[in-house]
Image (cartoon, helix red, strand yellow):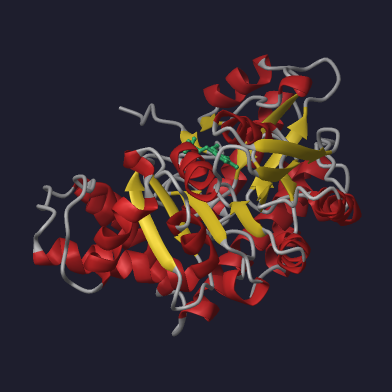
Amino acid sequence: MPDPRPLLMIPGPVEISPRVAAAAAAPPLGHLDPAFTAAFGSALAAMRALWRAGDDAVAFAVPGGGTLAMESAATNLMAPGERALVVVTGYFGERMAEMLRRRGAEVERVEAPPGEAPAVDAVERALTRAARAGRPVKALFATHVDTSTGVLLDPEPLARLAREQGALSVFDGVCATGGERFEMAAWEADLYFTASQKALGAPAGLALWVAGTRALAARAALAAPPPMAGDWEAWRPVMEGYEAGAPKYFSTPPTTLVLALAAALGELLEEAPEPAAALERALDRHRRAAAALRAAWRALELAPVPARPELEAHTLSALRFPPGRGNELLGAIRARGVQLAGALHPALAGAYFRVGHMGQVTRSAEPLERTVEAIAGALGRDPRAALAPFAAAWSAGAA
Ligand code: PMP
């Protein structure tokens, strides 16, 4: 019988490697089992290495997802009445702002129309204005790649601005980590959070973050503790315990998911002799896949939502439907064996679709070619017209 399961080309959850699938399908281990302890410790150390964080940063892997990671950032860093600045480039920036509002923070937003990103100057002006008014911003929040628009931000100047102004900088890396550059220590960023189901190539179910010393100090200084299940201080001894080979209990770790994450991160790290080079390999893979796919999109006359090439993420493509076509196209593509995603930004509902190109599918041309072929076929176009520029860009991108 043919496999009825489509190739998953949505922006998460993504296809996983055979090794990760084997880890996810293995009989469970207990949370105090030495093999589990070793795997959990190695995953946490790998996160710190891949985020390019300092040795004094703490890595957390907690049951949940990106949304839980966002919420724990809001509740551990901010107290009611404190001021936050959110750089909004889409739906997930809006969600971050709403979480901060529910935390009782005073939220200022710097935003741009969908597909655009605010200028760094606009962020600087907002920070300076707040400081002059005697209400300085405690933390700046930005989305590295907003999955609703496909807009990529450069975190480096934002982290630098925040540092200059004495504010913490927090980046949502859910649709970026492992596919876009992030250098936590060098950029002096304070918190980078993500989830397991995207470019890291593990199944969904884990909220992941690395917190630097200033962020940890901000949590420690809160007068009233945050809600318990996402409290960094409740989880920190657990994470440090596993890394030291001495597990501690706060809430049962999702042992199977942690083993799958450890397999995914291990596979990533094995791509080169040391972590920094392995990360470069992963970034190269995502850049190469994005460049080849963009060549195909151009051939198919599919216009990206991001307004300028430098705003286009390497982890997903947000593409406007061609004239006369809409969501029905996704069904036609699905009938050709490839699952894509529809719109997420309410202002562009029904106007565009999304193709995730993260993790395992960037390791070879085949799944990407299948995707191009399915889209071309559903559009009634000759797939060869798109596959040729794809192949040329793929070859040009060889390391
Ligand atoms: N932030 C971004 C940028 C995301 O892409 C997502 C998920 N698509 C989230 C946050 C929320 O993550 P989750 O769905 O795992 O809760």
Instruction: Out of 60 and 295, give the one closest to the viewer.
Output: 60
The residue under the point 89% across, 49% down is 122
Is 10 rendered above or below residue 58?
Answer: above
Q: Position of residue 1 (x, y in %)?
A: 30, 27
Is 349 rendered above or below residue 215?
Answer: above
Quadrant of the image occupied by residue 20: bottom left
Q: Position of residue 170 (x, y in %)?
A: 61, 54
Q: Position of residue 75 (x, y in %)?
A: 49, 42
As drawn, is 398 to the left or to the right of 108? left
Is 127 rendered above or below residue 159?
Answer: above
Look at the image and tell me whether residue 18 can be seen: no
Instruction: Out of 332 and 289, give the one closest to the viewer.
Output: 289
The residue under the point 13% across, 54% down is 31
As drawn, is 248 to the left or to the right of 208? left
Image quarter where the C terminus lies is bottom right
Instruction: Out of 66 and 304, give the one closest to the viewer.
Output: 66
Quadrant of the image occupied by residue 39: bottom left
The residue under the point 87% across, 42% down is 307
Q: Position of residue 24 (x, y in %)?
A: 25, 48
Q: How many marks?
A: 0
Look at the image and tell me whether residue 29 can be seen: yes
As drawn, is 260 to the left or to the right of 190? left
* Figure quarter occupied by ligand 1: top right
